[in-house]
Image (cartoon, rainbow, N blue to C red):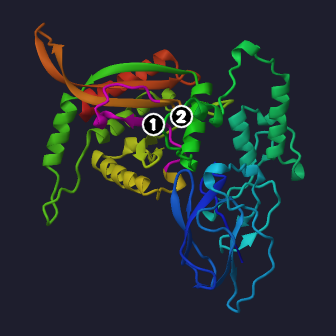
Amino acid sequence: MDVLMPQLGETVAEGKITKWFKSAGDAVKPGDNLFEIETDKVSMEVPSTETGVLAEIRVQAGAVAPVGAVVAVIAGAGGAVAEAPKATAPAAAPQNRTTSSAAAPVAAVQSTGAPIRLDPFFEVRTPAHNYGPAKLPGGAAVTPLARRLASDSGIDLTRVKGSGPHGRIVARDVEAAADVRRAVRPAAPAALLAPAASAAAVMALYRDAPFEEVPLDGMRRTIAARLLEAKQTIPHFYLTADVDIGRLLALREEANAAAPKDKDGRPAFKLSVNDVVIKAWASALQRVPAANAAWAEDRILRFQHSDIGIAVAIEGGLITPIIRAAETKSLTAISVEMRALAERARSRRLKPQEYQGGSSAISNLGMYGVREFAAIINPPHATILAVGAARRQAVETADGGIGFASVMSVTLSCDHRVVDGALGAELLAAFRGFIEQPVTSLV
């Protein structure tokens, strides 16, 4: 049986094998971990689904292989190994290569774990994500890879003619449509075009300065590509407000003091300011449903629930695990779930469904003492809320005197294609109301 590099998420095209738990010649049975895979987002162990002997390892630890590549072979109980083509993945260092998912060898995994070969018009999925070609409104089938490429390129799939089996739209059809669109687009004036500096050109500027080269791993490459895309293609605008968090702090202190203790005297939960912010933001998106949306190129998707992504710093980058339907959950439930997600994020053990999707996001740098900042929208989201540090500030009281209040600055980044200025202001005002009177988000 061929052991294949699995698909870990919608946009993952390759994975790096960081460790083999078994050696060639070792006996294996269903459930035994074979190897550990690392992508730009997560790490996870890949178990065997068959009983036999690990007859051959074709992709060594430290090497990168495209999704669907044969990384090892398991022989049956008798030890016979079927003749199989050599691995297509070169054992090159991950920082020196990129692989297109369209070029990856194609295979799929049945629910039993046995590989089956498919035509090259399917995108590989693991058993938990074994989606087939989707249908367009007109009835034409389109592969998941083609749909993703069309979304990235802004191609209207209803105008693309499929060349795959039974007229299915495949990746090469979308790429051809993108080439045609580029060919007919007017060229930009030469004066507006600035050539990108090569690595050699940049390094030449610092030939006399000591430095250390840090190769880009998959996560940093993905962050760079997605955020560059976001700033180049999303028309951002920003709204900033100061919110009084005096009542929030009092609610948090009272709730933590009343938390039940276990037999060792440890509290069952400990609410943070961020937990209350998540709940308030989820409630605000429910109050202003037109802003609880995502951009989908030729349409806007408005969501029923507030699925809130929370930016978590991890080694080498960041990731945004998602609290699903956060508006329906208590503060204690949000607190417990957020801590569990953050712990799995830092150990790179999140599942794709735990960080993909979402309707909006929060980035909180208050714990670092940052007073105010503007976050970059994570596409296809239409909003992201940047939360700064709390501070004591002099304010005018209702009777005209001077008092002090605990104040926190927040900045809302909006995609103007989805959220206009007035709508963004309404959303931020709703959030401010829930923060300044936090009990209103609990009823």
Q: Amino acid at mark 1?
A: Ala
Q: Secondary structure at mark 1?
A: strand
The answer to if 117 sits in the magenta stretch is no
Quarter of the image for residue 72 reads bottom right
Where residue 12 sits: x, y (%)?
63, 51
Where residue 314 sits: x, y (%)?
42, 48
Along the polypeptide, which appears first: circle 2 or circle 1?
Answer: 1
Residue that protrudes farthest toward the front in the picture? 208
For label 2, the residue is 381
Q: Amino acid at mark 2?
A: His
Number of numbered discs on residues: 2
Q: Secondary structure at mark 2?
A: loop
Quarter of the image for residue 435 reads top left
Where residue 182 sits: x, y (%)?
81, 27
Residue positioned 50% across, 48% down in the render: 355
Q: Which mark is residue 437?
A: none
Q: Nearer the viewer, residue 346 or 381?
A: 346
Q: In the image, is residue 186 above or below residue 49?
A: above
Q: Are marks 2 and 1 in contact (CB under 8 Å)?
A: yes
Residue that protrudes farthest toward the bottom in the picture? 78
Q: Quadrant of the N terminus?
A: bottom right
- Viewed as shown, does residue 18 lie left or right of 112? left
For label 1, the residue is 361
Q: In the image, is residue 309 above or below residue 192?
A: below
> What range of the chain is rendered magenta?
355-375
